[in-house]
Image (spheres, rainbow, N blue to C red):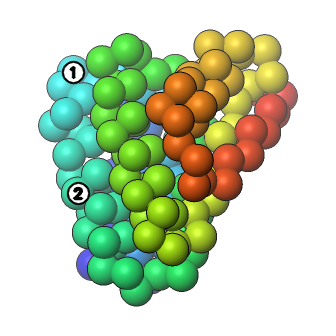
Amino acid sequence: MKIMKCARTAHTPEVVLDTEAGTLLIEGECYPENPATFFQPVIGAVQMVLASGSLKQFHARFRLAYVNSASTKSMRQLFLILNEAAKAGCNVDVAWEFDEDDDAIQDLGEDLMYGLGIPYLAFHETPYVA
């Protein structure tokens, strides 16, 4: 698998994982009916490519307009996987982009990063104007 794509829907974000380039994009609103079912293939693919040890660096970009609380558990799992890869020596960079007027999404990024005590990721917050 080189590129995994999940198209954006009214309830799910667009997901693009390029396993060769070492990039992940998750963008849009995130409130799927069953977050575990939505995120399972994404988390599995990210985990598989990072566990292979073939990547020296990995860039994850999150640009979310809304995330429901049920999806937060899957997001936490994804951040833990990224942290483990960084701990193992992969240079993992996380870009967390949020509408400058959306404190909730900004806080979610900070909670995922700092609330989990993730010390190995390079985390960058970037506000934008919607």
The residue wearing badge 1 is 33
Q: Quadrant of the N terminus?
A: bottom left
Q: Looking at this view, is 87 or 78 the one in front?
A: 87
Q: Which of the marked residues, 1 or 2, is nearer the chain's N terminus?
A: 1
* Element carrying mark 2: helix
Q: Which circle, 1 or 2, is nearer the viewer? A: 2
Q: Quadrant of the C terminus?
A: top right
Q: Residue at x 37, y 81 (%)?
A: 53
What type is the residue that disc 2 sits on? Answer: Gly
Horizontally, residue 112 falls left or right of residue 93, namely: left
Q: Residue at x 19, y 33 (%)?
A: 36
What type is the residue that disc 1 sits on? Answer: Glu
Q: Looking at this view, is 14 or 84 the one in front?
A: 84
Task: Rate crowding at label 2 as few (under 14), some (14 to 19) or many (20 or more) other CA atoms within 10 Å.
Answer: few
Tell me if I can see residue 21 in this picture.
no
When asked about the image quadrant of residue 39, the answer is: top left
Residue 10, percent from left and from top: 39, 26
**Which residue is most to the bottom?**
54
| Image mark for residue 119 | none
With respect to residue 32, does 62 lie above or below? Answer: below
Q: Residue at x 24, y 29 (%)?
A: 35
When asked about the image quadrant of residue 103, the answer is: top right
Task: Count numbered badges in the picture.
Answer: 2
* Element carrying mark 1: loop
Horizontally, residue 86 falls left or right of residue 128, namely: left
Residue 47, percent from left and from top: 30, 62
The residue wearing badge 2 is 44
When asked about the image quadrant of residue 8, the answer is: top left
With respect to residue 17, does 74 lie above or below? Answer: above
Whether label 1 touches label 2, CB < 8 Å: no
